[in-house]
Image (spheres, rainbow, N blue to C red):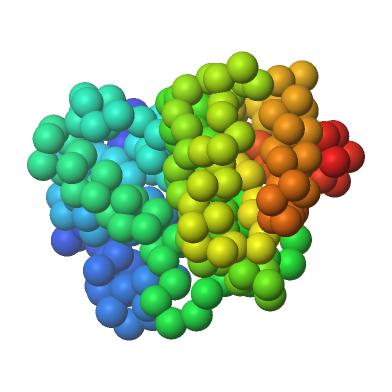
Amino acid sequence: MSADVEYHPTIKELPSDERPRERLVKQGAQALSNAELIAILLRVGVQGENAVQVGQRLLQTFGGISGLHRASLSEVQAQHGLGAAKASTIKAAIELGRRLTIESPEERPTIHSPADAAALVQYEMAALEQEHLRVMLLDTRNQVLDTEQVYRGSVNSSQVHVGELFKTAIRRNTPNVIILHNHPSGDPEPSPDDVAVTRAFVEAGKLLDIKVLDHLIIGNGRFVSLKERRLGF
């Protein structure tokens, strides 16, 4: 064997305490790295790379789990060693993780800060390819009742109808709302239209006796609270 050829052991050739599946059984899923979790989904690697190394390559190529989430199925399955079946498995697992972050079967999340609200939607909304406007409905204790989509498309004052935003809140007698929308560019800095829309919603809320607690713009890995910046409030 040439000295410059690097040998990569397969998962089966690794010591049992280094194999991802065995480690998960003994230590729990939280003990595994992202690459190791992906390796379990992939089951096997490709020539020259074991499954963990393929997982590492995918994370590096797409910029982590959030990048894999944003990538299309065709982009993922085009990666060497994947194909439709493995790519579908990865996308399905990530989607389950997304749904877990917004599901609260026993206890409704309570919003204490803009970061609390952003955490509930950041994972999903940062990956959207179009602008989506949503309204988070909260009770008198700021517990989340629901989050509903109001509009999809460019969010500006000439296209977004104030009545649509408050329709569900009125029907469900919701006292508080938080407005949410994403910037597909990944940059959450507010535009003049964002501020104008916020101002219109806040004023309409006062007339309807529904308090607009905040307007959050979701970007890639960060968000902006217009309430904190006193824009439109």
Relative vertical location of residue 111 with respect to residue 83 in this rendering, above or below: below
Provide residue 163's location: percent of width, then percent of height. 56, 38
* Residue at the extreme right of the image, as rendered: 230
Provide residue 102's location: percent of width, then percent of height. 45, 61
Q: Which quadrant holds residue 169? A: bottom right
Residue 166 horizontal side relative to residue 38, left or right? right
Relative vertical location of residue 35 with respect to residue 224 in this rendering, above or below: below
> Residue at coordinates 24% horizontally, 50% vertically from top-left?
92
Q: Nearer the viewer, residue 157 or 216?
A: 157
* Residue at the extreme front of the image, as rendered: 207
> Residue at coordinates 73% horizontally, 67% vertically from top-left?
112
Visible in this render: residue 229? Answer: no
Provide residue 153's location: percent of width, then percent of height. 47, 23
The C terminus appears in which quarter of the rendering? top right
> Residue at coordinates 22% horizontally, 26% vertically from top-left?
74
The N terminus appears in which quarter of the rendering? top left
Provide residue 161's location: percent of width, then percent of height. 56, 29
